[in-house]
Amino acid sequence: MGIVTPKLLRSFRKHAVIAILVIGAVVTPSSDPLSLSLISIPLYFLYEISIFVSSMELKRKQKRELEEERLDQQSST
């Protein structure tokens, strides 16, 4: 669909870090930094994994479109 692209995710990385820290602060039952870190670090890694998965899927989609385009050109000639 192309709604969330790797470029978009990378450009909003700073905002995502702040949002992750705020979510971690709200979700943790206490106010100590260890609890905040235990919630925030896995969330940040999930965000980075989503960027990686999105970029892999985009490359796969572009490759598939090129192959379809090449097949269309071969069938039309």
Image (cartoon, helix red, strand yellow):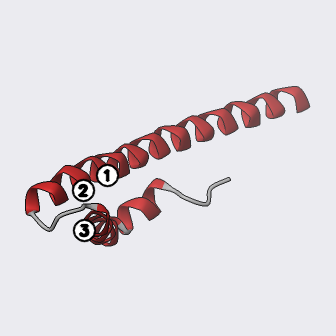
Residue at 75%, 37% (x, y): give it.
Answer: 69
Which label was assigned to residue 43?
1
Q: Quadrant of the C terminus?
A: top right
Kindly indicate the quadrant of the structure image that contains residue 62: top right
Which label was assigned to residue 40?
2
Single out the mark in the foreground, 2 or 3: 3
Q: Do tag 1 and tag 2 residues touch (Cβ < 8 Å)?
A: yes
Q: Nearer the viewer, residue 18 or 7?
A: 18
Residue at 37%, 69% (x, y): give it.
Answer: 12
Which element carries disc 1, helix, strand or loop? helix
Q: Is tag 1's residue or tag 3's residue first in the polypeptide sequence?
A: 3
Which element carries disc 3, helix, strand or loop? helix
Report the amino acid beneath label 2. Ser
Q: Nearer the viewer, residue 64 or 46?
A: 46
Question: Which residue position is annotated with label 3?
Answer: 25
Which element carries disc 2, helix, strand or loop? helix
Residue 41 is situated, as x and y percent measured from the top left of the image, at: 22, 51
Q: Do tag 2 and tag 3 residues touch (Cβ < 8 Å)?
A: no
Single out the mark in the foreground, 1 or 3: 3
